Image (cartoon, rainbow, N blue to C red):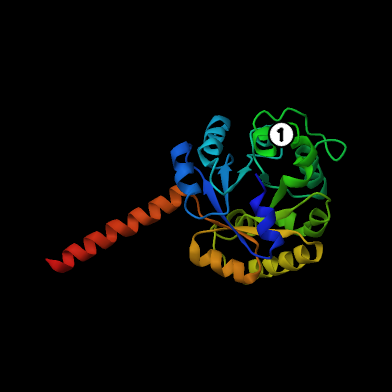
């Protein structure tokens, strides 16, 4: 299976990404049929574990989405294991320095580029029997998260690390680290200034910037701003949003007719 994220980026368009917090293959299967380009299993803040991640990947298989994972931390064993499980991209939280970015890339890549151990138990199904190791270093995406004041201060050094495909803004933690209320869609001038710098620095290096959004409105605004990967909240959040609005609309319309 080709890496659809890479193909979309090469075409100059933005990737619309789903986010799975619910540990359910059925939920993943439903999301994979909704038109997303990629689907990310969240092992950091979602209610997912390794086994539910594999179930989500199995459920998505056959649908035209690229499977990705946000790992809980920059830890080589976890990173290698999610790649072995079939992830085509790894989003890594709290990458604050060049050294941490280099360690992340090394964990994602096979020798001689990195230190990833060989044992692609499921990823071979994606890459083809006997060929996965030959293409994995080029096809798998390394996407560190920039979400702290320290990371912003080290932005250019992080982006200079060879092997990084993109970066991912965590708006909630980023704002939190600057003493602001944690939320996804930000409009504070100091945060927008950071976004502007990141977009320019990524463009210089042909790196693709991504960001987490609270929904369609924020995602569209960020695409227009220049982001090349936008995530629409997560599965549980989207379900709750639609459920709340549906209940409210039902009560409003039924009371209006009475």
Is 61 displayed left or right of 248 in the figure? right
Q: Is residue 198 above or below residue 140?
A: below
Q: Quadrant of residue 172?
A: bottom right
Return the residue found at the far right. 112
Is 180 displayed left or right of 132 in the figure? left
Image point (55%, 40%), residue name:
61
Residue position marked by numbered label 1 in the rendering: 80
In percent of width and height, residue 187 lies at 57, 69
Q: Is residue 57 above or below residue 11?
A: above
Q: Quadrant of residue 227?
A: bottom right
User: Which part of the image, by quadrant, shows the C terminus?
Assistant: bottom left
User: Which part of the image, by quadrant, shows the N terminus?
Assistant: top right
The answer to which of 25 and 178 lies nearer the viewer is 25
Could one spot residue 24 in this view of the protein? no
Q: Quadrant of residue 13?
A: bottom right
The answer to which of 209 and 173 lies nearer the viewer is 209
Count of numbered circles on the image = 1
The answer to which of 70 and 9 lies nearer the viewer is 9
In percent of width and height, residue 160 lies at 83, 56
Image point (67%, 28%), residue name:
121
Image point (55%, 67%), residue name:
220
In percent of width and height, residue 105 lies at 78, 43
**Other-residue count near label 1 (Cα within 10 Å), few / some / many at <14 / 14–19 / ≥20:** many
Question: Could you tell me which secondary element the residue under label 1 belongs to?
Answer: helix
Could one spot residue 71 in this view of the protein? yes
Q: Is residue 231 above or below residue 189?
A: above
In percent of width and height, residue 99 lies at 82, 45
């Amino acid at each position: 299976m080709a890496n659809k994220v890479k193909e979309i980026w090469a075409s100059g368009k933005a990737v619309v990404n789903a986010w799975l917090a619910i540990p359910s293959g059925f939920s993943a299967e439903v999301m994979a049929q909704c038109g997303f380009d990629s689907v990310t299993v969240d092992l950091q803040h979602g209610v997912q574990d390794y086994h539910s991640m594999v179930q989500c990947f199995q459920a998505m298989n056959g649908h035209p989405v690229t499977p990705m994972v946000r790992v809980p931390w920059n830890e080589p064993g976890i990173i290698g294991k999610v790649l072995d499980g079939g992830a085509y991209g790894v989003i890594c939280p709290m990458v604050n320095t060049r050294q941490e970015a280099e360690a992340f890339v090394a964990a994602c890549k096979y020798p001689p580029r990195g230190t990833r151990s060989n044992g692609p138990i499921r990823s071979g199904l994606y890459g083809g029997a006997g060929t996965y190791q030959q293409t994995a270093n080029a096809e798998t995406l390394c996407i560190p998260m920039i979400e702290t004041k320290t990371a912003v201060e080290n932005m250019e050094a992080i982006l200079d690390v060879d092997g990084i495909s993109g970066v991912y803004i965590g708006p909630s933690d980023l704002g939190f680290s600057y003493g602001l209320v944690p939320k996804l869609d930000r409009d504070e001038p100091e945060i927008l200034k950071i976004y502007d710098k990141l977009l320019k620095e990524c463009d210089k290096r042909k790196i693709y910037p991504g960001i987490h959004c609270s929904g369609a409105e924020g995602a569209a605004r960020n695409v227009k701003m220049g982001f090349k990967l936008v995530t629409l909240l997560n599965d549980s959040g989207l379900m709750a949003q639609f459920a709340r609005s549906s209940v409210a609309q039902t009560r409003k319309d039924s009371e209006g007719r009475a």
